[in-house]
DNA sequence: ACCACCAAAATGGCATACCATTACATTTCC
DNA sequence: GGAAATGTAATGGTATGCCATTTTGGTGGT
């Protein structure tokens, strides 16, 4: 710690944020636990300034909550909140997929197909690590192909906020087979350039995907709110 | 300015942010104009700290851009960006409307109808001020009825980012008649609890609404990108 | 026991100083 | 005259101190 506490080089905020994020996501800090600004700053050998900014970043990411005059506490993962975010995510991805379907070049779709088959390979090998990574990559790629910067950014934000849940329930892989099938359907619709169908399939897929996390995720599952699953069936 | 330079109390960041926001939105600061942190801080009799935070807030709101080592500059309203944001807004509002249509109580819908007729009254009186205000209120109310906190928050964010455009082109009221008709259609669909139709009508309405702003808004209208208007027509 | 009141500690927010890095303009060298 | 080097100002980022507000735990009065 002697070799770099001296310098004003940039990145301290990120370091602190990453450190805290890691520990929160990996569940080393229990929800509700207090994160005293000054104390933590001393421990991490930084001043209040970067610590404050880091906490604010984590607050926008939904990992901590800033209570007025009571400091920062680790946010608890409310299934309700997560479902709401997941729902918005699915809406955004549906829209993105529709746009992507129109905008993408044939090469883009070919690349998507390639990624899909890579993922399928990982699936067949029961290689969870790469399966999940490629799955994420594909979804992100689809959103990127929408060409809508705001959409991409907002999707990335939500995705980050849901990462914690995604991490916590990393083992729920019952429905791999089903998920793969859904991905196949999405890719088929892409190949046919049927934007509506791509959107619907993706939305459906995401609905089921996140339902899984939500149900198996927590103690009180008063999850049967209203806006769960699809909205089409009113 | 003499009556409140006596600091210590909280809210300096907000004051500064509001001040700058006002001037930017009202077009007193030209796009591209630099906003030197320290200089501005001196002028407004504050230190760098609140000024920095205010600028960061405005940056997230899309009003200023933070260029690395070149300071903050007033963001220019790129028609492209605005259209992209407007598109996402319409997607979110569509989703919100579908949820709202399912979740809303009969009283909620009645209240919506009431607001609608208030707006219609303002329309008949050619009362722009109240028309626009009520129009906003109705849209916000619909989103609020979705019951999805994330959705509400993200919608509010986008709405804020589009406020500038909304303000700049405040006079474009050619299509009042049409817009009113679209609102009637939306309300009718609401009354029948037809979620899909509510969603479609609202999306269509927003598409046309923002198209208006985008076209009349600026110099280079390379607006004929891809993701303008509706996505259904692929 | 209960409530009001007060003091100590924690927190939020602002001001300010310091230093490294980068942009920009000037100078210098070829 | 043009390119490279250099100096200067601006910026970003951090550390730190101060003070107001609020929380909190303890104290005394009834």
Image (cartoon, coloured by chain):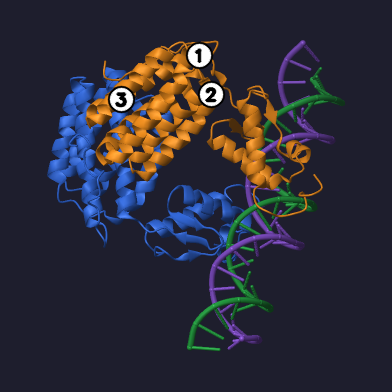
Chain colours: A orange, B blue, C purple, D green
Q: Chain of mark 1?
A: A
Q: Quadrant of residue B121?
A: top left
Q: Earlier in the sequence, mark 2 or mark 3?
A: 2
Q: Quadrant of residue B106?
A: top left
- Same chain for labels 1 and 3? Say yes or no: yes
Dot 3 falls on a residue whose secondary structure is helix
Q: CA distance from mark 1 to mark 3?
A: 22 Å
The residue identified by callout 1 is A172
Q: Which numbered disc, 2 or 1, marks the residue closer to the eye?
A: 2
Q: Is residue B164 above or below residue B192?
A: below
Chain under disc 2? A
Q: Quadrant of the C terminus of chain A?
A: top left
Residue shown at 30% from the left, 37% from the top: A100
Image location (x, y in percent) of residue A5? 77, 49
Say if labels 2 and 1 share a chain.
Answer: yes
Residue at 48 percent of width and 51 percent of height:
B59
Residue A221 vs B159, above or below: the answer is above
Report the residue marked by disc 3.
Answer: A186
Give residue B182's position: percent from left, percent from top: 16, 36
Q: Residue at x 43, y 25 (%)?
A: A119
Q: Where residue B124 sits in the image (x, y, percent)?
A: 14, 43
* A84 to the left or right of D17: left
Percent across and percent down for residue A75 are 59, 26
Q: Nearer the viewer, residue A43 or B222?
A: B222
Please, is residue B77 above or below residue A135 in the view?
below
Residue at mark 2 to residue at mark 3: CA–CA distance: 22 Å
Mark 2–mark 1 distance (CA, rounded to whole Å): 13 Å
Q: Which residue is mark 2?
A: A129
Residue B148 shows up from this direction: no
């Amino acid at each position: 710690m002697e070799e770099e506490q001296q310098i004003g080089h940039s990145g301290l905020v990120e370091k602190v944020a990453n450190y805290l994020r890691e520990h929160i996501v990996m569940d080393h800090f229990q929800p509700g636990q207090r994160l005293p600004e000054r104390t933590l700053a001393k421990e991490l050998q930084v001043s209040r300034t970067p610590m404050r900014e880091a906490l604010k970043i984590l607050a926008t990411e939904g990992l901590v909550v800033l209570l007025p005059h009571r400091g920062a506490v680790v946010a608890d993962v409310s299934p309700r909140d997560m479902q709401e975010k997941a729902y918005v995510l699915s809406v955004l991805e549906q829209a993105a997929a529709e746009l992507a379907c129109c905008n993408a070049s044939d090469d883009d779709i070919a690349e998507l197909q390639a990624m899909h088959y890579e993922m399928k390979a990982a699936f067949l090998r029961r290689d969870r690590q790469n399966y999940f990574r490629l799955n994420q990559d594909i979804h992100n790629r689809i959103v990127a192909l929408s060409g809508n910067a705001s959409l991409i950014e907002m999707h990335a934000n939500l995705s980050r906020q849901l990462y914690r849940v995604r991490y916590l329930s990393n083992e729920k892989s019952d429905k791999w087979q089903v998920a793969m099938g859904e991905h196949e359907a999405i890719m088929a619709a892409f190949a046919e350039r049927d934007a509506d169908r791509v959107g619907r399939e993706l939305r459906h897929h995401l609905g089921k995907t996140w339902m899984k996390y939500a149900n198996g995720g927590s103690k009180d599952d008063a999850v049967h709110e209203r806006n769960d699953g699809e909205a089409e069936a009113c």
